[in-house]
Amino acid sequence: MNLFSGTISNLENGLNYASLKNKTIAQNIANVDTPNYKAKDVSFQKMLEEEKLKSLKANKTDIRHYEFSIQQKTPGVFSYENFKYRSNGNGVDMDAEQASLAENTIYYNALVERISGKFNTLNTVIKGGK
């Protein structure tokens, strides 16, 4: 039986996603002057696709079958390989990164408030409504 009906774990997954996105944005901002650095981003859709592949198991029924392997990397993070924003080959648009950081911060704070509300509700129930 799942005591919290998956709500807290879903909020936790959202916080993990927002944290990974924040780290990626910070890495892009830190490398804004690095020649040939390609901007990175986090895609929720790619994270879902990679999770599906992790749970996918190949059934090898013959010795001639190839092994099924998954390359390990940070899930959901991808680079803009063919994008150059500056003449030195750097692909970071500082304005876009700052806007993305602000948007992600709002999203993260909303999740924190929601999970905090859940814990406050549980605390009230535990104390018997006092």
Image (cartoon, helix red, strand yellow):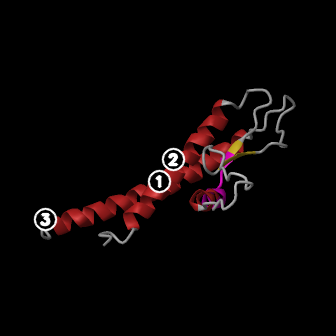
Query: What span is colored magenta in the figure?
Result: 41-49
Tell me which amino acid carries mark 2: Ser
Which residue is more in the foreground, 61 or 36?
Answer: 61
Residue 109, image x, y percentages: 45, 54
Q: Which residue is mark 3?
A: 127
Q: In the structure shown, which secondary structural element does the residue marked by tag 1 occupy?
A: helix
Q: Which residue is mark 2?
A: 19
Magenta span: predominant SS is: helix
Tell me which amino acid carries mark 3: Lys
Q: Residue at x 48, y 53 (%)?
A: 108
Q: Earlier in the sequence, mark 2 or mark 3?
A: 2
Q: Marks 3 and 1, how far apart in space?
A: 27 Å
Q: Earlier in the sequence, mark 3 or mark 1?
A: 1
Q: Is residue 29 left or right of residue 86?
A: left
Q: Residue at x 32, y 63 (%)?
A: 117
Relative to 3, is 84 above or below?
above
View extreme (right): residue: 87
Relative to 74, is 44 above or below?
below
Give the quadrant of the N terminus: bottom left
Query: In which quarter of the view is residue 94 placed?
Result: top right
Q: Marks 1 and 2, how far apart in space?
A: 6 Å
